[in-house]
Amino acid sequence: MITKVCAFYQFAALPDYRELREPLRALCAGLALKGSVLLAEEGINGTIAGAPEAIDTFAHELAHGALFGGRLNNLELKFSTAAAMPFGRLKVRLKKEIVTLGDAAADPTRQVGTYVDAREWNALIAAPDTLLLDTRNAFEVAMGTFEGAVDPEIKSFGQFKEFAAQKLDPAKHRRIAMFCTGGIRCEKASAHLLARGFAEVYHLKGGILKYLEVVPEAQSRWRGDCFVFDERVALGHGLQEVGLQEIGLQEIRLRERDEDAARDE
């Protein structure tokens, strides 16, 4: 049976996020879902997998159910499939941030860059005055990226603010277009740059995954594979699995080890 995968996030005020953990875990467990979900005061971020009808029920409950009371009505959702269950268990964790940057001024609920639809992305990044910036980790960039993209050469997203402080200048870099796997990192990065005085900041709505889903390969400016943090390891155009790669498996194992060792919040 085909397994359906749902990657989702939204920056939203969740002051009661601690109380949401167990009901959310119960919802997932009741639907026999596996994967990882992060809850923080700034929102929700996760990837889960299960039977197609269970995933559809879960997505509907997040956006429209009583648990979140309509606070996730702008949820960014991306669906794909897997030949087998890509997660070994279910984890629902409490965190200070749903994606860790460590900059209190970067608040996507207050200000964020301009979203660019995947079908309009090629035109934006082809403009000669646009700085195209990959906000992902170095090992992800090595597996695939857009033509002409700058690699910040960071080991974790938390290092992005140091890269920006050292390499980016509001006076010199008038237009910046950023991208990441699903949209969450570049959304927070755009809030960080706007807080630092950058005027034109754009980011790919839905991330690389949405681009690979809707843009035909013949028209694509993407080169290589897109790393994903589950047992599928990497996806290509049409969100097709491209086969296991040892470097990706190693990164997944290291991340799982670090998550298990880290305390919640």
Image (cartoon, rainbow, N blue to C red):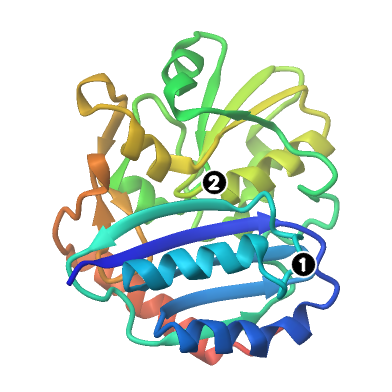
Q: Is residue 223 left or right of residue 14?
A: left
Q: Secondary structure at mark 2?
A: loop
Outermost residue, top side: 128
Q: Secondary structure at mark 1?
A: loop
The crowd level at tag 1 (other Cα within 10 Å; few <14, some 14-19, many 20+) is: few
The answer to whether any part of residue 36 appears in the image is yes
* Vertical arrangement, residue 232 with respect to residue 33, above or below: above
The crowd level at tag 2 (other Cα within 10 Å; few <14, some 14-19, many 20+) is: many
Q: Quadrant of the N terminus?
A: bottom left
Image coordinates of residue 110 in percent, x first then y, are 85, 44
The answer to whether any part of residue 145 appears in the image is no
**Residue named by callout 2:** 183
Q: Quadrant of the C terminus?
A: bottom right
Q: Is residue 7 left or right of residue 228?
A: right
Residue 126 disc label? none
**Residue named by callout 1:** 69
* Vertical arrangement, residue 72 with respect to residue 3, above or below: above
**How many angstroms separate mark 1 from mark 2 (CA)?**
24 Å
Mark found first going from the N terminus, 1 or 2:
1
* Between 194 and 213, the one nearer to me in the picture: 213
* Between 189 and 40, the one nearer to me in the picture: 40
Outermost residue, left side: 243
Image coordinates of residue 262 in percent, x first then y, are 58, 87
Q: Which amino acid type corresponds to the residue marked 2 in the rendered image?
A: Gly
Q: Which amino acid type corresponds to the residue marked 1 in the rendered image?
A: Gly
- Residue positioned 37% across, 46% down in the render: 141
Image coordinates of residue 172 in percent, x first then y, are 69, 17
- Residue positioned 26% across, 71% down in the render: 249
Image coordinates of residue 114 in percent, x first then y, are 67, 28
* Between 50 and 250, the one nearer to me in the picture: 50
